[in-house]
Amino acid sequence: MSDAVGVQSAPGNTGFVDDWSQDKQVFGVPWGKAMMWIFLLSDTFIFSCFLVGYMSVRIATTDPWPNPSEVFGLEAFGVQVPLLLIAIMTFILITSSGTMALAVNMGYRKDRNKTFWLMVATAVLGATFVGMQAFEWSKLISEGVRPWENPFGAAQFGSSFFMITGFHGMHVSAGVIYLLVIAFRVKNGFYEKRGGNYEIVEITGLYWHFVDLVWVFIFAFFYLW
Amino acid sequence: MAYVAIADRDHEQEHHDPQTFITKYIWSQDHKVIAVQYSITAIFVGLIALGLSAMMRLQLGFPDTFSFINPENYYQFITMHGMIMVIYLLTALFLGGFGNYLIPLQCGARDMVFPFLNMLSYWVYLLSVIILLISFFVPGGSTGAGWTLYPPQAIMQGTPGTDWGILLMLLSLAVFIVAFTMGGLNYVTTVLQARCKGMTLMRMPLSVWGIFIATVLGLLAFPALLVSAIMMLFDKTLMTSFFMPAISSMGADPGYTGGSPILFQHLFWFFGHPEVYIVALPAFGIVSDLLSTHARKNIFGYRMMVWAIVAIGGLSFIVWAHHMYVSGMNPYFGFFFATTTLIIAVPTAIKVYNWVLTLWQGNIHLRVPMLFAIGFIFTFIHGGLTGLFLGNVTIDLPLSDTYFVVAHFHMVMGVSPVLVVFGAIYHWWPKITGKMYNETLGKWHFWMTFLGTYSIYLPMHYLGFQGVPRRYFSMGNTEFLPESAQDLNAWITMSALFVAATQLLFFVNVVWSLMKGPKADPNPWGATTLEWQTPDTPPKHGNWGHELPECHRWAYDYSVPGYEDDFIPQNVPADKAPAGREHGADH
């Protein structure tokens, strides 16, 4: 045992710091998970910069900002429903977080079959989201929305829309690939050879939940505002 | 909670020793080899940037003399010099080079936590450097927008390199950020999760602390640069108007509307100011270790030093707009940013006092690394004090965009970190190569560099007070400048060429040492930190042989009374040597 273990912590802040800085892992988690946390923190800053940049140009532009409820409305059964597609997309993505959480649980139970299928379900939901996003893009493009101009108002509307949803869509697409790779590794016993450790499922889940969370912010700041 | 074995955690993944030349030196996953690869690449591009600065100085010192330097070239030299020095040399060398080499060795780990990712980090970095270098040879040349790349001029006709240069610059930056992220995640996770037994955070050498906090800053600051690079790429290629206002260019309307150039400045400096500390904090840490080792005395106020690094890192995120006083802002914001800027002087001053107090009554050995470390204290105090001037809005306004600013940031984040780089290379050279360098040559290198840089930058302060504007190709007939300003410029140019030439001494020393240098002692300086206690010099793959080291004390047990040696390595158990003067409750 190390000489630092078993020492009574000093009271107050010193003890607090000593506890955190012991000669053990700062976070009692696998290295990959700690690294994923740090990566997601960094990625948070990327999306924050995108959103702050979007808000800033929205304030700076002198042209009127289009009303997202109208631009993103769809006609269903003869009724114009605002944000219909976006609502469905959001629902699908949130649902995929649910299946992901179940997959993590099944992973820890070492139920490889259920883990596999739940991860595939998550990937399918994610792919559906990306597909609907492609539909949304093509609809807007057919209506004349371009990164440099659009018929509804400020040019920055299209610029921000394509940039932010594009960057998020790339994250979702990467997540789908990541999910499928891990899912098939779970299925074919890759992790059995490595001590039957399925924490990788949770690490994948961290990324997936993060991408969902980012979408919630994009939804709130871009579509609802 | 049960004790979690740390550095040996992945024992099921055996470290397979690389066999062939290619796996050993080219596609290597060994952190030491990657560190050397990073360093060589960074120093190579640094030499190019040094050459560019010589070209700029030739023009400034002797205008109308050199026909091969025209205004377009000059702006390209400025831009590429700044960008290469700050990002591709200093950031890559401190974090990719020294971070890679020192973190696992000083923490007592066998390697970084994810060696493959670490290898990828270097090769992606090399790709970013290649993209950067290609931009010199494309039609129109590299970008001449200034290293800050401010829009709208960065992408408008009339600025050099708006066809291809700026695209490749932005692309190269984005690729660099990907590379840095892969490396940075490794450094942070290794420090947090993979230290050896007994190596508490508060026993880590300050080098590791500095590199660690700098990496955290990088992971949080580079995203802002990435986003601004992406937005500007879109402004350039897709004609979006994130940063571009409605503007007339050469009598024509390029088609932009309603963007915000100030937004770019905010994003850029949200990255740019932490970037200063990404370069400075590793230098702070390394210089602390150099001073303590060569003064045979424990670092003064270790805990304070750690907290000062953390505090500086935190504060560096809320001072960015002090680069933008002249861009115009609400006076209350100016007040806020001036205040936070000046507050940074407090932890910084603590560090300077502690360095000086470490030297106080120490057994100072004026070896080459120590000379560079002490030289750093001089240049850093110097550059830091002028920073206090420029942090005040009212003083910054007249001095901004003059040579005073050039002198300030070259002293504080050019000369100072570079002195530490040299000091660190001399200090760790015996461990990295197993050879000694020529001490006399090293001392000549120090004195000529140190005095030479003062000869360059001290007169620049004076030129700045006189109002000589920075970034100008030539002064022409400027009424308010006396003719002597030009004499001073000629003097500065000659000094700069002299300093550039003296760097040859360093490379001569490197070659001499590699070819004919005597075999180095495993621990020539009598240093306490773990990297000097490796079974082999240079350390082999896996660093520690069969047994991982155990850390029993802090990194600064020098000249402990009642012990035969004047240093006690960190892996000497408490029952073999006195407990030393470790900070904490029980001493």
Image: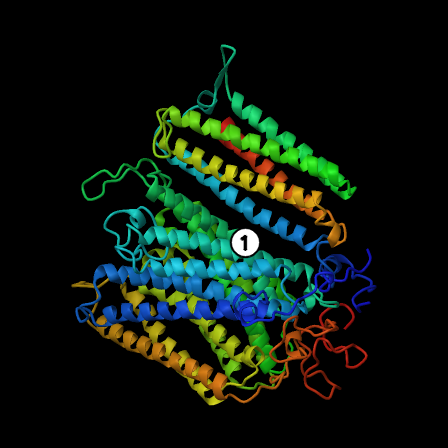
Residue B217 at what x, y percent from top left?
54, 56
The colour scheme used here is rainbow
Residue A54, picture quadrant: top left
Residue A165 at what x, y percent from top left?
48, 35
Left or right of residue B1, residue B537 in this image: left
Q: What chain does mark 1 sit on?
A: B
Badge count: 1
Estimate how packed mark 1 is, as few (under 14), some (14 to 19) or many (20 or more) residues with alpha carbons within 10 Å: many
Residue at the image position 30 percent from the left and 48 percent from the top: B155
Left or right of residue B305, residue A116 in this image: right
Residue at the image position 38 percent from the left and 59 percent from the top: B132
Residue B182, picture quadrant: bottom right
Residue at the image position 50 percent from the left and 85 percent from the top: B437
Q: Would you say residue B379 is visible in this rendering?
A: yes
Along the line of sight, which residue is nearer the eye, B485 or B543? B543
Task: Give the residue furthest to the top.
Answer: A78
Q: Is residue B346 above or below residue B517?
A: above
* Amino acid type at image mark 1: Leu
Q: Would you say residue B351 is visible in this rendering?
A: no
Q: Indicate the quadrant containing the N terminus of chain A: top left, top right, bottom left or bottom right.
A: bottom right
Along the line of sight, which residue is nearer the eye, B261 or A138? A138
Residue B308 at what x, y percent from top left?
59, 63
Residue B469, picture quadrant: bottom left
Left or right of residue B171, residue A51 in this image: right
Residue A193 at what x, y percent from top left?
74, 53
Q: Is residue B522 above or below residue B62?
A: below
Q: Which residue lies under the disc numbered 1?
A: B219
Residue at the image position 61 percent from the left and 31 percent from the top: A125
Element at label 1 = helix
